[in-house]
Amino acid sequence: MILTADNCEKFISTIESLDGLDPFACRIISLCTSYNPHLPFVDYWTVFDDKTKNPTGAIARNGTDFILFLTDKSDINEVSSFMRVAGAASVICSNKYNLDLFGYEKSHGPILVRTEEISENDSLIIDTPKIKEAYELIAKAADKYFTPPKFEDFYVDINHKLRHGTMRLLGLYDENNLAAVAMTVAESKQGAVIGAVACLPKFRNKGYGTYIVNHLTNILVKEGKRVFVHRAEQANKAFYDYLKFKCFDSWSEYHFKG
């Protein structure tokens, strides 16, 4: 049974009672904290066991992109049936659960986690950059694993989430030049997901990317949060190994044609 969740506080409490430390739970909690259920471009649902009526998972929609927080008690067939008629452009969830969907291309990769601080040897300049400044750097540093969204969409979303405390953005400066950025794409009380780490090509091989990710991770760990990274299958393995991130799970994303 899948029912609409229109009370944000109750919805988040239900998710936390299942597993607030799950990275997909973190993503959904962060989204719901940022955008309440009464807005037209988001929806939230709770998945229940038909017999016991106990909650077993959660679903969130942001535009045509869906996030699934599933557990071993979730009815995957029911969730699959729901997603087949939901009008999704993409669906992301744990790779432990194979959805029965049609007409998609599937990508996957490891989910990494870190829960401990690592010492910072250098004393580099870290600050919060302007959103436009950060976007321009991210766009210049984009590779085959990441295509930046349109600036207008990026600005509105980032500005809103920064004000709601559901993400943060840091920049590392070489003299007065923004050299690298790192940001969380989702934050909850118990967890955070790091994404969009970028360093300008001319500043690479100076350890700036390593420093800013470690600095951001240390801040989050000090706050008692479990820090996740959804890494592309073939990307940046040595980078995150060096930063002591460990394999936690794997993600899969379904992209639908048309």
Image (cartoon, helix red, strand yellow):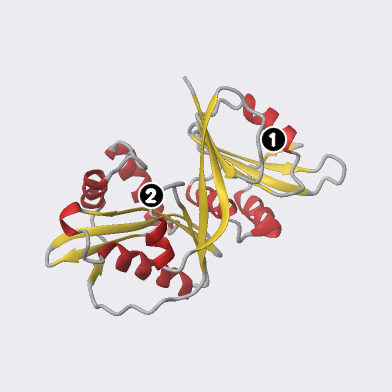
| 10 Å crowding of disc 2: few (<14), some (14-19), many (20+) | some
Q: Amino acid at mark 2?
A: His
Q: Nearer the viewer, residue 154 or 206?
A: 206
Q: Is 140 left or right of 157, judged from the image as shown?
A: left
Residue 95 x/y as whole percent: 60, 44
Label 1: state its secondary structure: helix
Q: Quadrant of residue 169?
A: bottom left
Q: Is 146 left or right of 61, judged from the image as shown?
A: left
Residue 56 x/y as whole percent: 74, 48
Q: Say if 3 sits above or below 25 in the image.
A: above
| 10 Å crowding of disc 1: few (<14), some (14-19), many (20+) | many
Q: Quadrant of residue 162?
A: bottom left
In this figure, which residue is indicated by the disc labeled 1? 79
For the residues bearing labels 1 and 2, Cβ distance under 8 angstroms: no
Q: CA distance from mark 1 to mark 2?
A: 30 Å
Quadrant including the N terminus: top right
In this figure, which residue is indicated by the disc labeled 2? 160
Residue 48 x/y as whole percent: 76, 43
N-term mark: 1 or 2: 1
Label 2: state its secondary structure: helix
Q: Nearer the viewer, residue 45 or 200?
A: 200
Q: Nearer the viewer, residue 184 or 38?
A: 184
